[in-house]
Amino acid sequence: MFNGFSQEALEFLLDIRHNNNKEWFEPRKAIYTEKIFEPMKALGEELFAPFSDIDGMMYKVGRIYRDENFAPYLHYRDTMWIYVRYDALYWNKTPTLYFELSPEGAEFGFRISKPEAAVMERFRSGLIEDPEFFLNLVEEVVEKFGLTLGGDEYKRKKPCPLLKLETYFVKKGLSLFIKVGDPDELFSRRIAEHVLEVFNAIQPINDYFHEIVEVEELAKAVLREEKEQQLSQLEPEINMVKASNIEFMW
């Protein structure tokens, strides 16, 4: 059962930031396991539990090393993470509920960090067709939980037909998150309860983007199939020489 993090956990992550090498880490590996990995694993199980019955949903708890999300020129992470999302080949191209622990505290919410350009184009088209549905989803959770809107932005702005949509038309990716640095919350079960409340509230936004990604994947599959059919029709018919029916004795 998750019972909160500790000051020792935050200090360890800060120390690994300044001592990112095996010589420093190995003698302190037990601290990482007890104070960081085990609590993160317990928290991950709790955060996924409400979503476990949803078809296709999965979760993953990051490790401090041998991590595909970790820059190759460093040995260890100084930020630990939990993802709850629909299964996908590329985690950063799919909508995700996430929790991250760093020396500064916790950050959690929703994000789709590096979606394909076509996904964001579909998102913008959907906003134009029915802006109120998405805006109401976002405004409700932002007002209730004090979430911050984030995400990388285009260097060149996309044409936007409505002033109230400009905030979203500049985004290459999108996130809605909150940061918690209060030790009284971080070092108790309150942080788990807070994250679960936010996750449940923003799941409709996660589903909104998941549907967009699925539609784009389906459109790409149809396009590939059409191209394959066109290529097969263009290929010249090859008349293969049939083998003789005569049996030879060797």
Image (cartoon, rainbow, N blue to C red):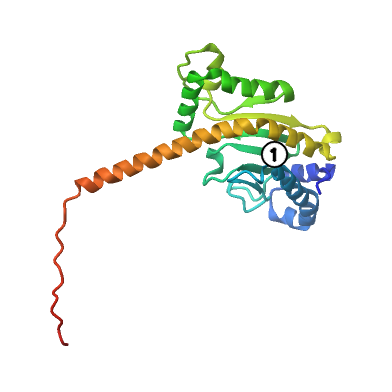
Q: Residue at x 16, y 57 (%)?
A: 238
Q: Residue at x 72, y 56 (%)?
A: 23
Position of 46 with respect to 189 (left or right) is left
Q: Position of residue 110 (x, y in %)?
A: 64, 33
Foreground of the two, 135 or 106: 135
How busy is the neighbourhood of tag 1: few (under 14 within 10 Å), some, or many (20 plus)?
many
Residue of label 1: 99
Foreground of the two, 46 or 185: 46
Q: Residue at x 65, y 43 (%)?
A: 83
Given the current orientation, which residue lies at the most extreme right position?
184
Q: Is residue 214 above or below residue 72?
A: above
Position of 4 with respect to 17 (left or right) is right
Secondary structure under tag 1 reads strand
Q: Position of residue 181 (x, y in %)?
A: 79, 32
Position of 87 with respect to 148 (left or right) is left
Which quarter of the figure has residue 144? top right
| Total numbered badges shown on the rendered structure | 1
Q: Is residue 62 above or below residue 101?
A: below
Q: Position of residue 48 (x, y in %)?
A: 69, 44
Position of 10 with respect to 217 (left or right) is right
Q: Position of residue 80 (x, y in %)?
A: 70, 44
Which quarter of the figure has residue 103? top right
| Amino acid at circle 1 | Phe
In the picture, which quadrant includes the C terminus?
bottom left
Given the current orientation, which residue lies at the most extreme top position?
163
Foreground of the two, 211 or 95: 211
Q: Is residue 203 above or below residue 23?
A: above
